[in-house]
Image (cartoon, rainbow, N blue to C red):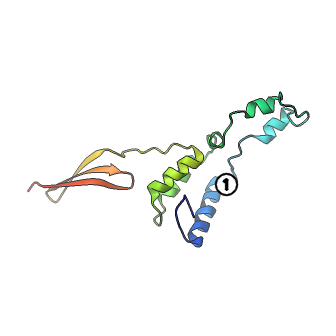
Amino acid sequence: MAFNQQVTEEQATKIRRNILNILDGWLPYPTDYLKRKEEGWHKEYKPENKYVSLMQGYSYHKSWESCPKKQELIDYIKTLDFIDVEKALKTFSEITGIEIDQGLVGTEVEMKIKGKVYKAIIAGMGILKEDEKDER
């Protein structure tokens, strides 16, 4: 499984390896333990400690906000030709909380090819609707 889709073990391993390579050691820890340790939270563990109050309401999604490779991860997922990329990006966004820029999704475009005018509405990685007119 990868991005909530069935893939081969080889494909899943490839995705996992490439994502870890892109992240280059960065991991989405929900807190910066080293920073909190410097602030002394480990010396006295009580509910009123600054560490505890800082952690209330802190989520896994928030930890992804500091990811330095967000766009690289999104761009990598877009290259995967053996899964439904739109579903993969949606799953990635749900897991990480990272907003995926849909760019031109939903935009109507018009192209003229060899005298024929084609209209389409951009739907992620594919075409949602297509109209054809002959203008010769």
Q: Residue furthest front?
A: 47
Indicate the position of residue 113 as horizontal and vertical percent values.
19, 58
Q: Residues within 10 Å of mark 1 (few under 14, many from 20)?
A: few
Q: Amino acid at mark 1?
A: Asp
Q: Nearer the viewer, residue 67 or 87?
A: 87
Q: Is residue 52 left or right of residue 107?
A: right
Q: Residue furthest left?
A: 136
Give the quadrant of the N terminus: bottom right
Quadrant assignment, res 49: top right
Q: Is residue 119 left or right of residue 104?
A: left
Indicate the position of residue 12 as horizontal and vertical percent values.
59, 66
The residue positioned 56% from the left and 62% from the top of the image is 2
Give the quadrant of the C terminus: bottom left
Indicate the position of residue 24 as horizontal and vertical percent values.
67, 54
Quadrant assignment, res 13: bottom right
Indicate the position of residue 58 as horizontal and vertical percent values.
68, 36
Q: Is residue 28 above or below residue 35?
A: below
Secondary element at image label 1: loop
Residue pointed to by mark 1: 24
Q: Is residue 79 above or below residue 39?
A: below
The residue positioned 36% from the left and 46% from the top of the image is 105
